[in-house]
């Protein structure tokens, strides 16, 4: 399943998120969840859909790059099918394009746009897709919406190019730069070759750049025998929890004579509560390698 992308030939796992209206989410889930189940099985990607009754939901797609492209292809073709079906009942003569909205950290939008708009122009011309980067950040977020529209094939090519830009933005001399979690939220790379951050150490903050709401801290104690389930193989599970919750999570080093480890969670109350839920879900997960997905 691993795919080598960009000149560095890196085997990586990416997390990409989409913003969708309720009707779009319903189309992706399908009757009794059959459509999303089929997408997960055939693409090999994890596809998680945020809970809630709000008008817009977040769809998180995680996996090796080729699995992500397969999942995007299936979503794009499903949306085109929906457009075709809706046109059969309307008087419209021209077929509207398929439109997807990515959620991208504002810190990465510069790389995506390029100097003087050169990169985004190159992506538009080489793929045939329309790409628009929102000028304003999403509400209560440090991220922007990137809208892609066109034929399914154009959208898939466009997503591939955006993934390469993201990988290049995070790669410095073959090693990954670790951005500040509050600035990148759910869009950090889950790494397989290099641990995310040394356990028990915090990621250095960048004063003056953090636009998140005031952060608070919550502490948990977890039995030593469950820590492996929470960390996952080479830190993949704890990294996924960081990505999905948007919280900073620090796991204290083991202390002699203690059967427990302390976990410190920092973030907004919503970040913290989601991180707690995901940690509890992981500690109940019988698979220590973190291959199971969280509930959609």
Image (cartoon, rainbow, N blue to C red):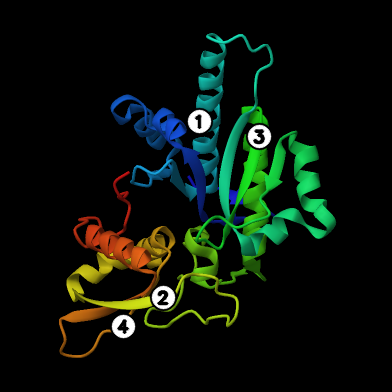
Instruction: Give the mark, 2 or 4, whose residue is nearer the N terminus.
Output: 2
Q: Quadrant of the C terminus?
A: top left
Please report the residue visible at 63 percent of the width from the left and 65 percent of the height from the top.
107
Of the two numbered discs 2 and 4 in the rendering, the one whose residue sits closer to the viewer = 2
Q: Position of residue 193 (x, y in %)?
A: 49, 65
Farthest residue to the bottom: give it.
Answer: 256
Measure the alpha-carbon separation of dots 3 and 1: 15 Å
Determine whether label 3 and label 1 are within 8 Å by CB: no
Which residue position is annotated with label 4? Answer: 252
Q: Which sits in the foreground, 248 or 267?
A: 267
* Label 2, residues with CA under 10 Å away: few <14, some 14-19, many ≥20: some
Measure the alpha-carbon separation of dots 1 and 4: 41 Å
Determine whether label 3 and label 4 are within 8 Å by CB: no
Q: Is residue 195 left or right of residue 93?
A: left
Instruction: Give the mark, 1 or 4, whose residue is nearer the N terminus.
Output: 1
- Please, what secondary structure does the residue beneath circle 3 have? strand
Image mark for residue 74: 1
Which residue position is annotated with label 2? Answer: 215
Measure the alpha-carbon separation of dots 1 and 2: 38 Å
Residue 257 lies in quadrant: bottom left
Residue 269 lies in quadrant: bottom left
Please report the residue visible at 40 percent of the width from the left and 65 percent of the height from the top.
242
Measure the alpha-carbon separation of dots 3 and 4: 45 Å
Q: Position of residue 142 (x, y in %)?
A: 56, 63
Q: Is residue 23 left or right of residue 284?
A: right
Measure the alpha-carbon separation of dots 2 and 4: 20 Å
Which residue position is annotated with label 3? Answer: 149
């Amino acid at each position: 399943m691993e795919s080598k992308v960009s000149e560095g030939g890196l085997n990586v796992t990416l997390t990409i998120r989409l913003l969708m209206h309720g009707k779009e989410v319903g189309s992706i889930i399908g009757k009794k969840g059959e459509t999303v189940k089929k997408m997960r099985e055939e693409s090999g990607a994890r596809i998680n859909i945020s809970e809630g009754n709000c008008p817009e939901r977040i769809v998180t797609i995680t996996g090796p790059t080729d699995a992500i492209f397969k999942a995007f292809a299936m979503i794009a073709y499903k949306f085109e099918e929906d457009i075709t079906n809706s046109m059969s009942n309307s008087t419209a003569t021209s077929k509207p394009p398929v439109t997807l909205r990515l959620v991208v950290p504002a810190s990465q939008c510069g790389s995506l746009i390029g100097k003087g708009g050169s990169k985004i122009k190159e992506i538009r011309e080489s793929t045939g897709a329309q790409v628009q980067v929102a000028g304003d950040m999403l509400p209560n977020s440090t991220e922007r919406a990137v809208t892609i529209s066109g034929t399914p094939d154009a959208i898939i090519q466009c997503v591939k190019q955006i993934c390469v830009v993201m990988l290049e933005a995070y790669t410095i001399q073959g090693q990954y730069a670790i951005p500040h979690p509050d600035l990148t939220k759910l869009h950090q790379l889950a790494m397989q070759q290099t641990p995310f951050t040394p356990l028990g150490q915090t990621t250095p903050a960048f004063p003056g750049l953090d636009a998140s709401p005031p952060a608070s801290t919550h502490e948990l104690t977890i039995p030593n025998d469950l820590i492996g389930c929470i960390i996952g193989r080479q830190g993949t599970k704890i990294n996924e929890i960081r990505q999905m919750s948007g919280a900073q999570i620090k796991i204290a080093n083991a202390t002699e004579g203690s059967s427990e480890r302390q976990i410190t969670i920092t973030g907004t109350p919503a970040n913290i509560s989601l991180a707690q839920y995901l940690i509890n879900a992981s500690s109940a997960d019988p698979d220590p390698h973190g291959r199971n997905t969280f509930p959609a």
